[in-house]
Image (cartoon, rainbow, N blue to C red):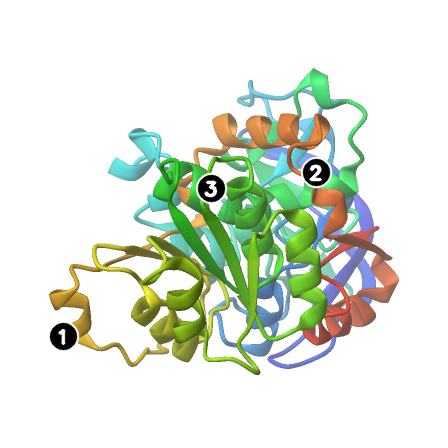
Amino acid sequence: MPQTTAAVVDRRGAQFALRPIEVQEPRRDEILVRVQATGMCHADLAARNGDFPFPLAGVLGHEGAGVVERIGEAVTAVRPGDRVILTFDSCGRCTGCVSGLPSQCAEFVAYNFTRGTRLDGSCTLSSADGDLHGNFFGQSSFAGYALTRERNTIAVPDNVADVPAQELAPLGCGVQTGAGVVLNVLQPSGGSTVAIFGGGVVGLAALMAAALLPLREIVVVDIKDSRLELARKLGATQVVNSGTDDPVQALRDLTGGGPDLVVESSGVPAVLAQAVRSLATGGTAAVVGVPAFGATAPLDVADIVNASKRIVGVVEGQSNPPEFLPRLATMVADGRLPVRELVKAFPLGDIERAAEEMRSGLAVKPVLVP
């Protein structure tokens, strides 16, 4: 079995601990990927803290990019030597999957969070202390190797050969989510006004996608001036610091009554309430930020009904990864999606520093290099 180093979380709230692990050989429908880079995302830290229901001890990581080492005999989409982007997993059998919407997989939570094993209950990872839970988003890529499936292993197009793995890795979740909510779901028409709550990687990816469109105003709301300065650089026409200004009133003033469309990426329930309240009559709020499972938001139902507002939840940018990720990779290669502006690389051994810099805002998108 392949041996490598992984960042292991032993129990809820524990720090990442680097230790040697073994990865099982791929079965007939599995792929062994040598990880070259993997992004750190809010979901990784939430799972470590117990906010998301991933079983521990285990290995997290769900924005991997690397090279295929070995494949099972049933795999046809990739071959050894291919550069790949790793993304979320899905069952392939339900209505969402067969209709080209795997982000709406009926078993999304099980395949990406709660199982931690293969379907038959077997573990794919082990250490000197015994079996480890893996299969986080079908990959557990905080390691030198990841064992994946064909459904969540996407070949990198030949025309992006020069794009480094550090810029491809974030496409698998954060960038896919932010860009997808704009391009796949909201699809704003020319002259629309869009507000984005949250200047993390998802919100800024939404901004980068929105900046490609002929919109009247793109306003980013955050509490950190450094994030707002970056947002201006990436195409925001206006910014609002919600730590010093009322974002609802500010958005009404800046857009002439409220934005037509809102992306809520912060994952803070009170911010979701502000986002919905700020909408213009007939507006739509797309919710992509996820707080702890079970969290609720204080929404004014009368305002939603009387102003004909819509709220839609969006998972992974409503993406079909085999189609959308090559499109995003091409946009990175030709400069339309400047993901490099978001990335800060860390050795895997500095994973705790990466987590702290993400929490503090010093790093928008930490990317770990095994």
Disc 1 marks a residue whose amino acid type is: Ala
Q: CA distance from mark 1 to mark 3?
A: 30 Å
Which image quadrant is residue 320 in?
top left
- Contact? badges 2 and 3 (CB < 8 Å): no
Query: Residue 239, percent across and down?
Result: 57, 63
Q: Residue at x 54, y 60 (%)?
A: 220
Residue 302 numbered mark, or none: 1
Q: CA distance from mark 2 to mark 1?
A: 43 Å
Disc 2 marks a residue whose amino acid type is: Leu
Answer left or right for 369 relative to 120.
right
Q: Residue at x 78, y 43 (%)?
A: 166
Q: Which residue is mark 2?
A: 168
Residue 180 numbered mark, or none: 3
- Quick one: 162 or 308, which is closer to the camera? 308
Which of the two marks, 2 or 1, is nearer to us in this view?
1
- Contact? badges 2 and 1 (CB < 8 Å): no
Answer above or below: position of 63 versus 94: below
Which of the two marks, 1 or 3, is nearer to us in this view?
1
Query: Residue 149, percent across and down?
Result: 55, 36
